[in-house]
Amino acid sequence: MVSITKNKLKYIRSLQQKKFRQKYNKFIAEGDKLVLEILQSKRTKIELLVGTADWVQAHASLLRQIGEIIPVSERELKQVSALPTPNQALVIAEMLAPEIIPERVQNDWSLYLQTIQDPGNMGTILRIADWFGIQHVFCSFDSADIYNPKVIQSTMGAFLRTQLIRMPFEELTNRFPDLPTYGAVLHGNSIYTHAFPSKGILVMGNESKGLPKDLQAQLDQLITIPAHRVSGMESLNVGVATGIICAALRKG
């Protein structure tokens, strides 16, 4: 069994930090199911795999194109893992090159995320987009880093099937001026009574501040999820709200 060198250990751990992910253009992903999805994806190039010896042996047929494989003990895997309970395998891969598919954006729904900063929320929203077949997720530059390990883990592989693209909202609407835009706010038109078109851009705002007033002014429609009359809650989690609204968009 091959041991992890100190330099390799330092390199793997460094990718928990954004500055080193950007420096090397690499990200880290962990766990049996997620690693298997990455191995089978055509969008990723894997530099390094670290896995328990039994796991490496069991999946040898998928590992032929990987540059470096390090079989380790469970104790050694725990040394490089950021998970409370490491799960058999870890990979380092090149960051994906996102692509805008104009005809898909023009004829379907897309999401725009304005200052979504919690990694768990970002990952959940990407997972929701994947569930509802929303291929493009645009976001502001101050939104959470998709390659934050917490984002990667919470997407459950959805980051492989969605295109996450950072750009200002104005740039997106200038490029696709004919698409209707909808913003989720606390006081807007009810999603239960609104007739949604088959395409558009749904804009979701910051966890605590919501959508800025200047951005609201640029939107065609402001929509809301009405609370039940006996509810005592002031608002919904942005990931939960995104899921409910996406279900309404796809209802027809």
Image (tube, rainbow, N blue to C red):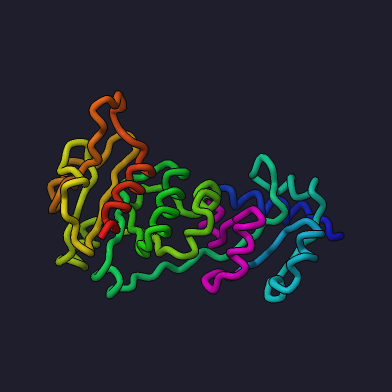
Q: Residue at x 62, y 68 (%)?
A: 39
Quadrant of the image occupied by residue 173: bottom left
Q: Residue at x 40, y 64 (%)?
A: 163
> 30 or 36, which lies in front?
36
Q: Residue at x 84, y 60 (%)?
A: 2
Q: Is residue 151 magenta?
A: no
Which x, y percent locates residue 14?
62, 50
Q: Is residue 229 above or below residue 164?
A: above
List the single residue furthest toward the right.
1
Identify the magenta region. Answer: 18-45
Q: Is residue 120 above or below residue 21?
A: above
> 217 or 107, which lies in front?
107
> 11 or 28, which lies in front?
28
> 81 or 53, which lies in front?
53
Q: Is residue 18 left or right of residue 72?
A: left
Q: Is residue 220 above or below residue 36?
A: above
